[in-house]
Image: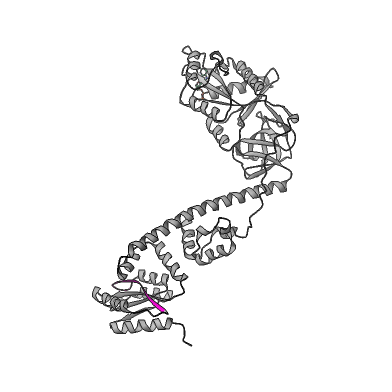
């Protein structure tokens, strides 16, 4: 709880402004916070950890062009809701089922590979449109090579059509236009193309380079034309990858399987994934136990652009996370350990910022409070101070702790205004000698209350009551906390007693 930490900091008197986040972790300081606050500070646990060496895993530098070989394109289908994205993906998947032995059934694993009769392959991402696309981009991973923009021929350009175009443009991914639902009588593909001009999507007929395919996802019409357009664009893009060395990839989807534990679908981007490979992704790692394709068939290896289900993760890594192969299990543990540590450090840094801001705020408030008090009399000032919040009280106690002066904090309770006033007047005229100072931290009318006890405890003060009482439970509380309450019925006696108390505070004379 940041408030508790803050309070603790205030009491220890550490000036955070003078500390860098790293030095904040210094043991001495942590101990002080923990001791004074008597609380469990989460930083205390971290104190021992000396700043560690960054042992993170990173992508390899770009491969030697001589090592690059062609790879299939990875395609994302985007478009307005109800324009036919799901239907298109289903139709594409079905082309594969037909091509497989009877009984084969494709499952949803987040991505699937389409084998064309020509021998070409295309990988389709089958994750809920925009969200996944944006999430991956936000993480700086770019898996998609081509966006197929689905626009229903009878509806034309809609809100999410425009958003999809924006996503593709921001990611600098080229678009292929799939004008869908052309089987419908009211379909008007030409209108769609015209509307898109306003959004900088210029089809070939208009002198641009965007291929447009008129199709029906529902009836499976022109699916092959769409696939061929994709392959043609992929050729222009000259998509290549290095299928040697340590594996790099991206997690497309992840879930926990009842029997197999955490399972992820990944797109491999570099290297060749095989059983036994050690992978790290986010703060999880895996020794690859099993790999499956979208038909649930085990595969022995996955090369760049291939979607593959991976079993063997220790925990579920999140979608969009980067996958990196490392040399050994020990190395994987080291990387995950470092990442956890780095995250904690980041969290602490953020906490520190919040605390610093809070501290400044309170310092400013305190300063302002003091300025506004400087015109008041001594007594008005005291009264006003105690109306202010507990942070100011903490600040005052800190100040007092800092000074070497001898101070006797007192609380004065009288039976009526007049008597309290009279006592305070005498105390006002009391000339503090150099060695011990009287500090009236609170005064009021009425019996000694729990609040008085608490104040006395905070300031290690003594309570003086004039013609007042304290009920039994208050007396017990005071006894328990070791707080002195002194009752008098004659002002003179009270003052004498107070003077005695003051002298007892003086250092013994030699
Ligand atoms: P999504 O929200 O973009 O995924 O759209 P769906 O694939 O769920 O399709 C929305 C509706 O349009 C469904 O009722 C589909 O059957 C229908 N639909 C999709 N493609 C076609 C098509 O080519 N022709 C016709 N007539 N209907 C289609």
Q: Nearer the viewer, residue 135 or 470?
A: 135
Q: Position of residue 61 (x, y in %)?
A: 70, 37
Drawn side of residue 153 relative to residue 448, left or right: right
The correct choice, above or below, for 99 with respect to 255 in the image is: above
The correct choice, above or below, for 228 with respect to 508 in the image is: above
Q: Position of residue 26 (x, y in %)?
A: 59, 61
The answer to whether any part of residue 202 appears in the image is yes
Q: Residue furthest top?
A: 185
**What is the quadrant of residue 261 in the picture?**
top right
**What is the quadrant of residue 411 in the picture?**
bottom left
Q: Residue at x 44, y 82 (%)?
A: 506
Q: Nearer the viewer, residue 266 or 105?
A: 266
Identify the colour scheme used. one colour
Q: Inspect the magenta stretch and tell me whether residue 440 lies in it.
A: yes
Q: Position of residue 220 (x, y in %)?
A: 58, 16
Q: Residue at x 41, y 67 (%)?
A: 396
SS majority, magenta: strand
**What is the quadrant of residue 471 in the picture?**
bottom left
Q: Nearer the viewer, residue 92 or 230?
A: 230
The answer to whether any part of residue 80 appears in the image is no
Q: Nearer the viewer, residue 373 or 159?
A: 373
Q: Residue at x 51, y 65 (%)?
A: 38
The correct choice, above or below, for 12 with respect to 226 in the image is: below
Drawn side of residue 198 relative to residue 62, left or right: left
Drawn side of residue 255 relative to residue 463, left or right: right
The residues colored magenta run: 436-448
Q: Position of residue 131 (x, y in %)?
A: 53, 33
Q: Inspect the magenta stretch and tell me whether residue 401 lies in it.
A: no
């Amino acid at each position: 709880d940041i408030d508790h930490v803050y309070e603790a900091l205030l009491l220890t008197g550490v000036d955070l402004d003078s500390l860098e986040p790293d030095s904040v972790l210094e043991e001495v300081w942590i101990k002080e916070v923990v001791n004074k606050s008597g609380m469990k500070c989460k930083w205390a646990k971290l104190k021992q950890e000396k700043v560690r060496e960054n042992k993170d895993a990173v992508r390899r530098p770009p491969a030697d062009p001589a090592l690059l070989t062609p790879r299939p394109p990875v395609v994302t289908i985007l478009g307005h809701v109800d324009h036919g994205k799901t239907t298109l993906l289903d139709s594409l998947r079905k082309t594969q089922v037909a091509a497989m032995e009877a009984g084969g059934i494709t499952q949803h694993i987040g991505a699937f590979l389409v084998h064309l009769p020509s021998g070409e392959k295309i990988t389709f991402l089958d994750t809920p449109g925009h969200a996944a696309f944006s999430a991956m981009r936000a993480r700086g991973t770019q898996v998609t090579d081509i966006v197929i923009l689905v626009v229903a021929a009878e509806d034309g350009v809609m809100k999410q059509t425009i958003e999809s175009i924006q996503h593709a443009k921001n990611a600098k991914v080229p678009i292929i236009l799939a004008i869908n639902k052309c089987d419908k009588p009211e379909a008007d593909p030409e209108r769609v193309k015209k509307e898109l001009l306003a959004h900088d999507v210029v089809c070939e007929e208009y002198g641009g380079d965007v291929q447009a395919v008129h199709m029906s996802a529902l009836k499976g019409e022109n699916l092959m034309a769409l696939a061929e357009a994709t392959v043609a664009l992929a050729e222009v893009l000259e998509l290549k990858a290095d299928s040697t060395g340590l594996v790099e990839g991206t997690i497309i989807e992840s879930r926990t399987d009842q029997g197999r534990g955490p399972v992820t679908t990944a797109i491999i981007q570099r290297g060749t994934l095989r059983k036994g490979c050690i992978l790290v992704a986010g703060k999880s790692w895996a020794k690859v136990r099993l790999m499956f394709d979208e038909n649930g068939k085990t595969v022995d290896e996955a090369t760049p652009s291939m979607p593959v289900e991976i079993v063997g993760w220790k925990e579920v890594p999140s979608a969009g996370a980067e996958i990196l192969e490392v040399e050994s299990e020990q190395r994987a543990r080291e990387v995950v350990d470092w990442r956890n540590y780095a995250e904690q450090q980041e969290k602490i840094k953020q906490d520190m910022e919040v605390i610093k801001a809070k501290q400044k705020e309170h310092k400013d408030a305190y300063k302002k409070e003091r300025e506004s008090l400087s015109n008041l009399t001594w007594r008005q000032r005291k009264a006003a101070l105690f109306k202010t919040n507990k942070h100011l009280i903490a600040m005052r106690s800190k100040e007092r702790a800092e000074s070497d002066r001898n101070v006797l904090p007192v609380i004065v309770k009288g039976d009526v205004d007049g008597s309290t006033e009279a006592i305070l007047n005498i105390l006002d005229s009391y000339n503090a000698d150099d060695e011990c100072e009287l500090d009236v931290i609170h005064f009021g009318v009425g019996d000694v209350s729990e609040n008085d006890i608490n104040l006395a405890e905070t300031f290690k003060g003594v309570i003086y009551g004039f013609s007042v009482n304290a009920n039994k439970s208050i007396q017990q509380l005071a006894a328990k906390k070791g707080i002195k309450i002194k009752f008098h019925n004659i002002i003179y006696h009270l003052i004498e007693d107070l003077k005695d108390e003051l002298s007892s505070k003086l250092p013994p004379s030699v």
